[in-house]
Amino acid sequence: MVESTGQWAVDACDALTGPRCSDHPDYLFRPYLGPAHLNALDQVAAWMGEAGMTTRIDGAGNLIGRYGDGLKTLIIGSHIDSVRDAGNYDGPLGVMLGIAVCAALNAKGRKLPFAIEVYAFGDEEGSRFPAPMLCSRAVAGALTLAALEVADAQGVGLAQALDMNGLAMSRFLDARRDPAELLGYVEAHIEQGPVLEAEGLALGVVTAIAAQIRYAVRVTGVAGHAGTNAMRLRKDALAGAAEMMLAIERITGAGPSDLVGTVGRISAGPGAPNVVPGDVTFTIDLRAGTDAVLHPAEAAIVAELKAIAHRRGLGLALDKTHELPPSPCDEAFRAMLSRAVEAVGVTPREIVSGAGHDAMIFSPIIPSAMLFIRCKDGISHNPLESVEPADADLACRALLNFVDQLEANYA
Ligand code: GLV
Ligand code: MN
Ligand code: MN
């Protein structure tokens, strides 16, 4: 590994771009089970091998690098898929830091009483199939086969996508790990917000991850001639959807600051300048730190959307595609991470994550914790994402300290 470990981790993320590792020619887009995802796995597996790890791909398409041996295993994980027009570090940086930890242990010939497995999860973002975190949920045993009956925007089902990549739906749930064999889960991730930068801190320790809900919404009206349909007689699905979006903004904006609502995707059909839109689909993503805030907001939004549809004579179908409760991080793991952050000279700032992470899936079954790394201007889900190699270096050293503490406490 070159210069500093942090520099290597940042460079490795940057290397996972370009035509081989992105499925879009103009920007980074690495959806689950696309060609770029599979190419990226080849590269990451090679780095894992150089770090002294053995590699395998499980039934869900997760790449796993294993370092050392033992009855129990610590998972260091994050995701390798991306949103559309992504930055380079959301997900991959956590994978690279896991590899960097194993490389550092390997360079010293360190044997631990437990194994470390670095997971590069295939699908955290839900940017292909309408079901985020499918791959970590498979590992945690938090999925049924019925939940896997999903298709992408082109109508390609998950079963077909698995098949096209030499995987099989019948093996998907084999990715499950027995929690009794797992010591815990730790994930390093860019903060994706501005708090650490504003406070001049390179690292932060996550206390909990916000609850999240997603909906797929369909609004149906009547398509018709844009020149002949009087305004008061129209059933314009897009105008109705626009009013619904403003209602979502108003309801979430009136709540506490942790309540956020986003319409991130919309399509209107038939999609011609001279046709009144008759069929609109859009997504809703709702988040809050507690269910006590999220659920009343969800109920208010559903009631308001129904009222708008009724008043405008539109059809409305609401399909809840995703729901995760708020996920507290493990107290003991958090305390160890805080000590690790302090040990590398950073005040251990505690922080709640508004973004979702694979750690949410593990926190109900094994001790789980997250280390946040400062990112420039708090920007994420955007190609302007930027991380200082020196901060990534501190993160690697903090993770190594965490592993040392785990070893010292290992019974
Ligand atoms: C993942 O980045 C999410 O929070 O949606
Ligand atoms: Mn993301
Ligand atoms: Mn992420």
Image (tube, rainbow, N blue to C red):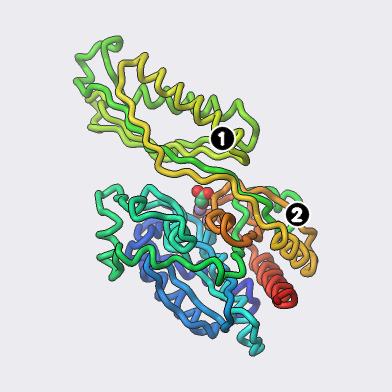
The answer to whether one can see residue 181 in this image is yes
- 1 or 2: mark nearer the eye: 1
Classify mark 1: helix, strand or loop.
helix
Q: Is residue 186 above or below residue 112?
A: above
Residue lying at the far bottom of the rendered structure: 109
The image shows residue 80 at horizontal and vertical percentages of 46, 63
Q: Which residue bears the numbered disc 1?
A: 294
Query: What's the residue type where badge 2 is placed?
Result: Arg
Q: Position of residue 178 (x, y in %)?
A: 50, 68
**Res 388 → quadrant:** bottom right
Quadrant in which the N terminus appears: bottom right
**Which quarter of the image is occupied by the C terminus?**
bottom right
Check disc 1: other Cα within 10 Å, few if <14, some if 14-19, many if 20+. many
Q: Disc 1 vs disc 2: Cβ atoms closer than 8 Å?
A: no
User: What residue is rendered at 44% in x and 51% in y?
Assistant: 132
Horizontal relation, residue 391 to residue 227: left or right: right
Residue at horizontal 54 percent and vertical 85 percent from the top? 52
Question: The residue tagged with tag 2: helix, strand or loop?
Answer: strand
In the shown orientation, is residue 405 left or right of residue 54?
A: right
**Residue 234, percent from left and from top:** 27, 15
Query: Which residue is depicted at the point 58% across and 28% down?
Result: 253
Instruction: Name the residue beneath numbered marker 2.
Output: 349
